[in-house]
Amino acid sequence: MGEGFKVEEFEASRDPFDPLRHDLIIITDSENRFKKLNILIANYEWELEGLREMDSPSEGPLQVFPIPYLVAMKLMAGGAQDEEDIRNLFLVMTGPEKEKSLELARLIKRDKNLSRVLASGRHGRRTREDGN
């Protein structure tokens, strides 16, 4: 990598309440010329499937992890911010992406969690429009 870069390795957490359940490599540039690069090591076949769905970086800039697979990872993490992210992602997803998200949620046994998260966004939260 060169002298100007710092590479840190983190093992997956063994704590069942910690959302980071993946080995992680973080590469930073000491001169801040480049963005930080986080490399998550895939643990599940469905994560590898999501990586295969991405366009090749040789065909242009590195693509974002496909939204349905990102939703599944956020369901696995299960934090409050993850739930908010899931609600926001569902607002911009296409019908087929929503179906794939539901399929993945069933696969990872988080379909009830997904239903709860989506329902709480519609019914369980007050908004500014409510005056609260």
Image (spheres, helix red, strand yellow):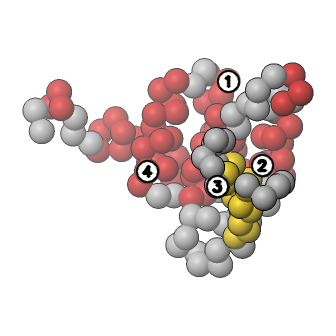
| Circle 4/circle 3 CB separation < 8 Å | no
For residue 118, side relative to residue 42 (left or right): left
Which element type, helix, strand or loop, lies under badge 2?
A: helix
Q: CA distance from mark 1 to mark 2?
A: 18 Å
**Which residue reaches farthest bottom?**
14
Q: Which residue is mark 2?
A: 47
Q: CA distance from mark 4 to mark 3?
A: 29 Å
Which quadrant of the view contains residue 97? top right
Question: Which label number is shown at residue 81?
Answer: 4
For residue 15, side relative to residue 123 (left or right): right
Pair 4/3: label in front = 3
Question: Which label number is shown at residue 30?
Answer: 3
Say whether disc 4 or disc 2 marks the residue closer to the N-terminus.
2
Taking the image as drawn, is residue 47 in sight? Answer: yes
Please tell me which residue is depicted at 42% across the width and 44% down the height of the picture.
84
Q: CA distance from mark 3 to mark 2?
A: 31 Å
Please tell me which residue is depicted at 12% across the width and 39% down the height of the picture.
132
